[in-house]
Image (tube, rainbow, N blue to C red):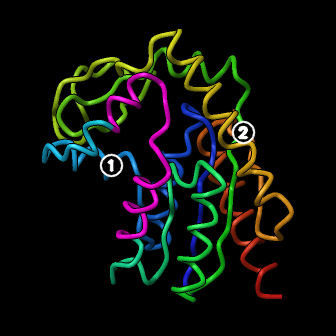
Amino acid sequence: MGLNVIMMGPPGAGKGTQAGRLARERGLLKISTGDILREAIRERDPVAVEAKARMDRGELVDDETMITIVTNRLLRPDARRGFVLDGFPRTVAQAEALDRIVTERNNGPLIVVDVEVPQHELVRRLAMRRICVKCGANADPFGSADTCPKCGGGLEQRTDDNHEVVLERLNVYKRATTPVLDYYRERPTFRVVNGAQSPERVAHELDTMIDDAAGAQRV
């Protein structure tokens, strides 16, 4: 039986870091819509280029684009063991599409984890965040390195991380995803973790919650 996890949370909550760790430790496929989009942008896919422009303005990518991207990825053979989704779903339409995919796969429960962080802390984190110009990876906001630890590329502040755009991104995220959280909230596999703690503490609570949710689904 596989394990399928959705990591939800606003920009700056640290869900990407936790999703990567969880996927590595449990042998699951980590699927980040941001990574998929960046790959398509490098290939000059016009749909992805337009999606990137929307993201730079603090907007979310439309449902049809994201559903197509994620569906194609989840139906590949390497996703059969399970997956950790980072950045999807962000709307009820996307959540409904994901339910159909999980039903079609018939390979384990869908566990939803919401990483909660106060807005003032999110703004502080995002103001310090840098991104690799070569591979697109996020760098440690508190680190002093000038190059990416993954590929050696240069680091710069994200174009969508200035103060005004950060606030708009958080507002857009809240408006769009509150209905998604409500869509999942009453399920026995829905959990909330306090993301304002240290990464180590968040990881411990996250692992405990996922194991508990998986057990609840089997009962």
Mark 2 Cα-neighbour bin, 10 Å: few <14, some 14–19, many ≥20: some
In terms of secondary structure, where does tag 1 sit? Answer: helix
**Residue holding disc 2:** 116
Residue at image position (49%, 77%) is 82
In terms of secondary structure, where does tag 2 sit? Answer: strand
Q: Which residues are magenta?
A: 51-73
Return the disc, 2 or 1, that comes first in the chain's sequence: 1
The quadrant where residue 171 appears: top right
Q: Main secondary structure of the magenta part?
A: helix
**Residue 58 placement (x, y as % from top left):** 48, 25
Quarter in which the N terminus is drawn: bottom right
Circle number at residue 35: 1
Give 27 or 163, whichever is nearer the viewer.
Answer: 163
Residue at image position (56%, 45%) is 15
Q: Is residue 160 magenta?
A: no
Residue at image position (62%, 72%) is 99
* Mark 2 residue type: Glu
